[in-house]
Amino acid sequence: MSIARLRILIVPLLTSVFSGCAAPRANLWDGTSVDRWHVDGHLGVVGAVPAATLSALGDAQIQAVKGVAGQDSLSDSILLHKAAQSLVAAGLDMPGMNTVASVHLGLGWGVEAGYRREGGANAWSLRWQFLSAKTSGWNAGIGAMYSSLDYEMPSMLGKVQTTLGYSFSRTDISVPLVFSKPLGEDGKYGSVGGGLLGGWTSTKYGFDPDGLYRKWGGNVSLLDKLPDQKSSFLSYGCSGFAKLGYEHAWLLAGLTVLWQDYGSYQVPGTEPVSLSGITILPSLGLEIRI
């Protein structure tokens, strides 16, 4: 079987097995705001297919995870590096599918404030529609969303997280710039469009492998604790969407693609972990405006 075909099989398997925490980054907005004191609600699902994480959760990585989980001593530094890489990658960009729910309240002057819950993350946002199709034929808006999240890994990765005493938290700021063409008068039937996204992520992580020994090079010693470290990186990308329905309810399908260089992350007893790659975020949901 070719490597390309094997990857095609691995991707849906991993995205069905690994799910849970994920930072809200997919664009779920068509650039239009609701009138003052009116409400916009969204309920749907968002997937994540991150190239770096899928590579770090391949077969060799999973075997390393199994070899480290629940142990009190390690005799292979490569095994430790691969298991730690899996933990770091999963915290930075966990593949899977998450439910998402959001609500936005119109404040007037094209401005609306909102709350979004996706996976285990909470997000708050402000959005401003600065261009109206009534005067230009196009709608356009810009927003800012802040989210925070503490990670607990699922299933097998959770055992490694306990063994290595791994902690990971992140905060994200995402800025979408969105353009859309309305379908029907005032977008009665929906809209189609797309836009650009920029983001900034700050992470805090550490390892506390209490009582875990390392055995290589003929020496036996406790694996050192790694005090809390901080790191940050930028994300860049684009999105496209189609919003179809009638008057107050629409089905919104979209695709967001992001590129990020996550940087380098220190790991106890082995070389740092470095990751970079694209993340594909498909979304599907129901939007209601009242």
Image (cartoon, rainbow, N blue to C red):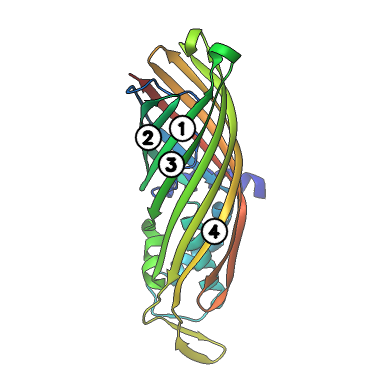
Name the kind of residue labelled 2 in the image: Gly
Write down the residue under mark 3: 97
Write down the residue under mark 2: 114
Q: Residue at x 51, y 43 (%)?
A: 174
Q: Residue at x 66, y 50 (%)?
A: 3
Q: Closer to the camera, 189 or 158?
A: 189
Labels 4, 1: front one: 1
Q: Is residue 275 above or below residue 84?
A: above
Q: Secondary structure at mark 2?
A: strand
Q: Secondary structure at mark 1?
A: strand
Give the distance between the C-alpha atoms of the residues marked 1 and 2, in whole angstroms. Answer: 8 Å
Q: Position of residue 145 (x, y in %)?
A: 45, 41
Q: Residues within 10 Å of mark 3 (few under 14, many from 20)?
A: many
Q: Residue at x 53, y 18 (%)?
A: 132
Q: Earlier in the sequence, mark 4 or mark 1?
A: 1
**CB under 8 Å between callouts 3 and 2?**
no
Q: Secondary structure at mark 4?
A: strand
Name the kind of residue labelled 1 in the image: Arg
Name the kind of residue labelled 4 in the image: Ser
Q: Earlier in the sequence, mark 4 or mark 3?
A: 3
Q: Position of residue 286 (x, y in %)?
A: 39, 24
Write down the residue under mark 4: 232
Write down the residue under mark 1: 127
Name the kind of residue labelled 3 in the image: Met
